[in-house]
Amino acid sequence: MSHWPDDFTVTGQHVVVEPLTMAHEVDLAEAAADGELYKLWYTWVPKPEDIGKEIERRLGLRDIGSMLPFAIIEKATGKAVGMTTFMNIDAANKRVEIGSTWYRKSVQRSPINTECKLLLLQHAFEELGCIAVEFRTHFLNIQSRTAIERLGAKLDGILRSHMRMPDGSLRDTACYSIIASEWPAVRTHLQWKLEKPRD
């Protein structure tokens, strides 16, 4: 069954973002174990032994058209170092959320996230004609909120008691977006971030 958007792969200098498959399971299990990210309470990263189930879950959502899941491949190693998705897909209004994203600890704060977001945003706005791209995260996930704001996304608001976390606590969700008219400036900003010397 075909769903909007179609599967696609995008390639940059540091990263390849490609459709998620079960072939990525071994790399992603290793990635999830790096830094024991699955122990963080304010986000959700699958345990290494649950990666296969998580891939199957995301592919199931692809089958019904609500998610387009990707593996994030580090070009230097050829290994999958994380996952991301287009989710909450609204084909009628040409809106997607980039979310359910995580990276292994060793590649965090590297150019990989910036370039991954640049490539996905470029495809969303320039190939799919999206009117907006959304980002959502836990209100208390300061690392994630800072990363989203550094992309150039603007805070739309806070959904209070929006969802229940695995530990039973209620999450206040910070909602951000980039709209089509902002994309040229955001694209220039992200390209500059990738090209400037690192501190």
Image (spheres, grey):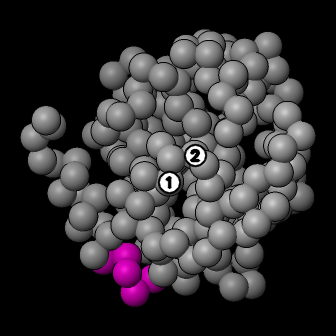
Image position of 93 with respect to 8: above or below: below
Q: Is residue 5 visible?
A: yes
Q: Which residue is mark 1?
A: 145
- Alpha carbons under labels 1 and 2: distance apart: 6 Å
Quadrant of res 128: bottom right
Q: Amino acid at mark 2?
A: Asn
Quadrant of res 165: top right
Numbered range of the magenta stretch: 180-184
Q: Amino acid at mark 1?
A: Arg
Q: Residue farthest to the left? A: 197
For the point 65% across and 51% down, the residue is 138
For the point 45% across and 82% down, the residue is 180
Report whether 174 appears left or right of 172: left
For the point 44% across and 68% down, the residue is 153
Magenta-drawn stretch, dominant element (helix, strand or loop) = helix
| Relative image position of residue 12 (x, y in whole percent) | 34, 44
Quadrant of res 71: top right
Q: Quadrant of the N terminus?
A: bottom right
Image position of 155 with respect to 10: above or below: below
Q: Residues within 10 Å of mark 1 (few under 14, many from 20)?
A: many
Q: Residues within 10 Å of mark 2 (few under 14, many from 20)?
A: some
Disc 2 element: loop
Report whether 28 appears left or right of 128: right
Q: Which residue is mark 2?
A: 141
For the point 41% across and 26% down, the residue is 107
Disc 1 element: helix
Question: Looking at the image, which is closer to me, 97 or 2?
Answer: 97
